[in-house]
Every structure is written in structure tokens, then in C-alpha cells.
Amino acid sequence: MDVRSTEFPRRADAALKDAGLQKALGNFRRGFPGRRAAALAALPEFDRLRDAARDIKNHTLAHLDYYLEVFARNVERAGGRVHWCSTAVEARAAVLAICRRAGARTVTKGKSMISEELAINDHLEAHGITPVETDLGEYIIQLRREAPSHIIAPAFHLNREDWEESFRRAHADLPAERIFAERRDILAEARARLRERFLAADVGITGANFLIAETGSSVIVTNEGNGDLTQTLPRIHIVLASIEKVVPTLEDCCLFLRLLARSATGQDMSVYTTFSTGVRRAGDLDGPEEYHVVLVDNGRSALIGTEFQDMLRCIRCAACMNHCPVYGAVGGHAYGSVYPGPMGAVLTPGLAGLAQAAHLPNASTFCGRCEEVCPVRIPLPAMMRHWREREFERRLSPPVVRRALGLWAWFARRPAAYRTASRLAVWLLARLARGRGRFAAFPLAGGWTAGRDLPAPEGVTFMAEYLRRRREGR
């Protein structure tokens, strides 16, 4: 996975100064969280469903090899084929081989984060095959040669004027005087342009929200019809899925579907929920002649049995990033990873290596909102702390951070010195604040005061107050 998260501080600073991005983020912050809250208020059993989903995922991960084998047998029973891929290189090779056997020149694609992780588009283009993103958001960022900034709303960082400019530039053969008065005008133009691509495609590639071991089915959840067209019109359907997407039964999948859309977009159910099982059978009106499932590990099995295993419960709803104050301030591109936000801060170091992603577990206020809203109760802050501990142990943190922590540790091991230093610091900072209660600027805290005031301490230290009350018998 191509990760540039070492540039997070520079990217975050640029994002905070980007007026267009900040406008888009303002719209984003007013959308998903409110709709999720409304959807949950209408489902009183939501927390019980979360507990059940967590337990199903834990059970499945504890027996992952068994359920993957059951899934593969049932795929083959339905006329499909499973390709087992340990690495991204193997997965790209499997997809390319299928396309080459079919003589494919054009491939349509549904939205798929695993295809972004594997850089499938770049690989196909390098071998003379044209991939066409058919999700509306993915289509616009493909025109702009950008990466997704969100896992369910890939182009949320753009404003309507950005869409219009890109469409006029990419669709230069259309009348220049056409007017984009409403969003549906953009949608209609994209639909007309993509229709010919759907009909011409030799292969369709989708991701999978879930894989059902019991039936050998793949499931996609979308709000556009592009996913269905991608997997039913071409002769060949390729499903790209990571190994943790498997669930034991159809009933289990239905439980997760009750959680997914409510957590992601605030809908009771997405507009389209499509189950695909094998190849077209006699009497079927549509469907592929070949059905391939490319199962991808790419570092996930190494997380099993570690303190990061719970991350594999993730169902990619994006609730954590929709409620994260850091993500809401800088957007997804600042993370430099396919997976942004709190879930990316945990998953990316596990897949790409901590040396490449050490900044990400530090991109958090630890407010706990990500864990609070997660539909499968992933303890994201705890896992970010684990990555921070490993970063410190491997001496990957910046020298100034290590020196500051070393100084704090020296005082923490000496309670008397710690209390004395705390009292002195409180007294000195209170005097320097001159009764204002805050600092608009402060040495060594410029990164903080550039965007907010630094509160000045008031009163005495916690320990001093505790000892006073203890002496008074309170």
C-alpha cells in the first residue's frame, strides 16, 4: 500500500489553510452525524445489535480459516472460482490474468477501497486496460486524478463548482453553454457518459461489504445502481475482498445490514443491497458467465492474535471519521493513506508498517467519539495508544518528543519533585497570564496558540487541593 503518512503534519497544515476544503468540510460536519443520530433514535435495540455484531465478528475471526474454506467451497459449488492472494502483488496479478484471458480492453468498477489499497487502476492502465470508475464520486475523482478522501463519500472534499469545472474540462465535446443548475444536472451528464462504458465493458470489478460463508455469496451496499450494472452486464464479474469480510450465515449478514447504513449515512437501509452468488444459471435474465472472488490478505492475518485483532471487525461504515474532530478539520487526504480517520490510524500501521505510518496514531485528540459511535465496538483509542507505545519503543518518535517524555518520566518517578514542579509551574503561569486566564501566544506552544488560546492555570494543583481536603477531613 502506497502510504505517505509521514507527511501528515505538512498536509494537515495545508488542509487547514485550504478555503475550498474547509467549505466542503463544513457541509460534511453538518450532514452525517445528525442523520446517524436520527436513525439510531428510531431503533431502540441498536446497542443490542452492536453487541451481537461484535460477538459474531469475534467468533468469525477466531475461526477465520474455517469460514473462509466454507465460503470458497460454496463459491465453487455455484460455478465461481476463488483466488487466494497473500499480498497486493499476487492480487494485482490475479486480476490482470483474468482480464487478459478475457481479452479485456475496458473494465468497469464499483466503489472499492480494497482496489484502492491494491492500486488496481494503475496496474491495469500500465498493461493497456482502461478501468472506468462508475460510482459518481469515484468517477469525478478519477477525472481529476485524485485519491478518495473518505471511504463512503470519496469526493466529499469537493464543492459543486469543482465538479462543474471538472466535467466541463473532461467532457469538452459537449456544448460549452450547458448549465448545471442543480446536482441532478451533473448526475444526468455522468449517467449519459457512463452508459456507453457499461455496455462496452468486458469485465466488471466490485468490492464486497460482506462475504457469506453459508451461501458463497458476495454482498455490495450502494446508493447508486452502478454496482448492479458493473456486476451483471459484463461477461466476467471479479469480486475484490479482504479476508475479514466473511460472516458465517445469511442471518448474520442481515444483522450487519441493520447497522451499516444507519452508522454510515443515517439510512435505515441503503438504496441497493445486492447479493451475488456464482455465475448465470439457466433461466437467469442477466448475470456473468464467470464469477471470480479475489481474496486478499495483505497483512491482515498478521494482526490476528495481537492487540490489533479487533480492528478486523471493521465494517467500513466511516462513523468514526464522520465524528472525529481531527478528520473533520483536515479531511482525508491529509492522512496520506487509503484509509483515513481513526480506523485508518489503526489499520494503516498494521498493513503498511509503523515506520511508514507513525504519525497517524498521533492524529487524535483521544476524545473517544470514534469508539462511542463504532457499530462493532472497536476500541480505537486503546489501539492507537498501543501503536504510540510501539513508536516510542522503536525510537520512531521525534527527538523532541522523546526528550519531553523522558523529562516527564523523571518527575513522575519522583512524587515530591513532581508536586514541587507542578506548584511552581502553576504559580509562574498564573503570574504570566496577568489575570487574563489565557495566553494568545506562548513560547514552545505556537502550534497550539496559532489556532486557539492556551488556558492559564487557576487556583492550586489537584494534589494540593486533595491534601487540603484530606487534612480538613472532607
Image (spheres, helix red, strand yellow):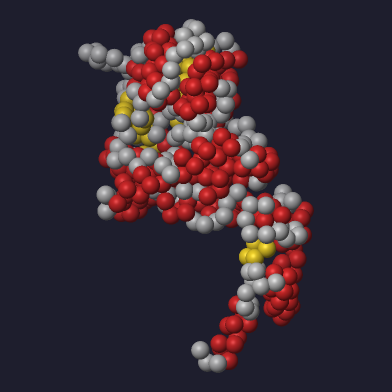
Residue 114 seen: no
Residue 48 spot, x, y in % from top left: 31, 54
> In the picture, which quadrant includes the N terminus?
top right
In the image, residue 65 lies at what x, y percent?
A: 44, 38
Q: Position of residue 429 (x, y in %)?
A: 71, 71
Residue at the location (63% across, 69% down)? 437
Q: Establish if 432 lies above or below 202.
A: below
Camera-side residue: 327 or 260?
A: 327
Residue in the picture at 57% in, 15% down? 125
Residue at image x 49%, y 11%?
176
466 vs 220, left or right, is right
Q: Position of residue 347 (x, y in %)?
A: 54, 43
Question: In the figure, 451 relative to 471: above or below?
Answer: above
Whether 171 is drawn above or below 300: the answer is above
| Residue shown at the point (52%, 45%) measured from the top left | 328
- Can residue 245 be seen? yes
| Left or right of 255, for residue 451 | right
For this orientation, the residue located farthest to the bottom is 472
Number of callouts: 0
Snapshot quadrant of residue 453? bottom right
Judging depth in this view, the residue of 154 and 282 nearest the camera is 154
Q: Is residue 61 above or below residue 196?
A: below
